[in-house]
Amino acid sequence: NKIRSVVKIELKDEKERLRIFHLKRHSLNIKEQFYSLFRMGNALDGLNEWNMIFSLHEVTIPSMVPVVFGEKRKMGMPWKSITLTEHIYDSFRLETFIHEKFSSLSLSSEQILLKRKIIKKLASLARKFHNLGFNHNDFYLGHFFIIPSTMTLHIIDLQRVVRRKKIRDRDRIKDIAQLLFSSQQINGINNTDCIRFLKDYLQIKKIGFIEKNFIYKVLKKYLRINRHTLKHLNKAKGK
């Protein structure tokens, strides 16, 4: 990707312990610069991601571990930047973890309980994230990491995150639709799990009219994302 690339760096510290870092390079083209500044009101680049890491840490939402940031500007606008973060040790990408742990047709009672616990954790984190005015714009399972030993979830890839005093309904719907879409791309998540997540996210026991309206809008957005993805896949295949 000419716009963003990530390099993994492995070093040993003075005690010979392996330390892992991720160097992310951002390059904004003209189209992305103008989209960022005029439509979103802030630049969706490395600096935005760097600032959002600290914003999430301030409100106790686990994210990446910041190390250093640097940037180059042209005509006062962001052009190129680098962000160095330390690895989230003992963690797994959430979509991979779910697929490997729960893709079997027959799950043990322990596996079922673990999956429900993860769903509850994810719903709680998403609710807190949104209630504090954040929206991600790339809210897919692949942008969450889980540390199984502590059941801690970390949100990553924050370059498109926006924070307002109050999240807009359309942004909340988009984020949840993206989560729903990514859950349908792996084995291990079924419709019951999705309903359970929505109930936990909305903090309800029974789905009423207001909740049905919200879910309808989420599903409508999910179908749009699905169509858009299929269109791009077919285009890439030359169909």
Image (cartoon, rainbow, N blue to C red):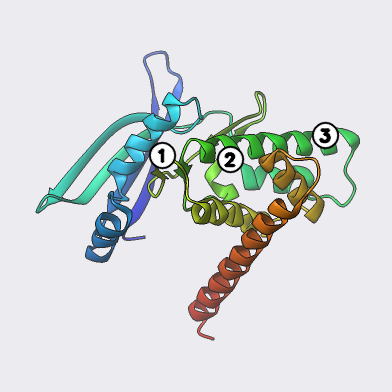
Q: Element at badge 2?
A: helix
Alpha-carbon span between mark 2 and mark 1: 16 Å
Label 2 sits on residue: 126
The residue closer to the viewer here, 72 or 101, is 72
Left or right: 171 with respect to 160? right
- Residue located at (52% from left, 52% from top): 169
Q: Is residue 206 visible?
A: yes
Residue located farthest toward the top when viewing the structure as drawn: 15
Q: Residues within 10 Å of mark 2 (few under 14, many from 20)?
A: many
- Residue located at (70% from left, 47% from top): 198
Label 3 sits on residue: 113
Label 1 sits on residue: 165
Q: Element at badge 3?
A: helix
Q: Position of residue 98 (x, y in %)?
A: 70, 45
Q: Amino acid at mark 1?
A: Lys
Q: Amino acid at mark 2?
A: Ala
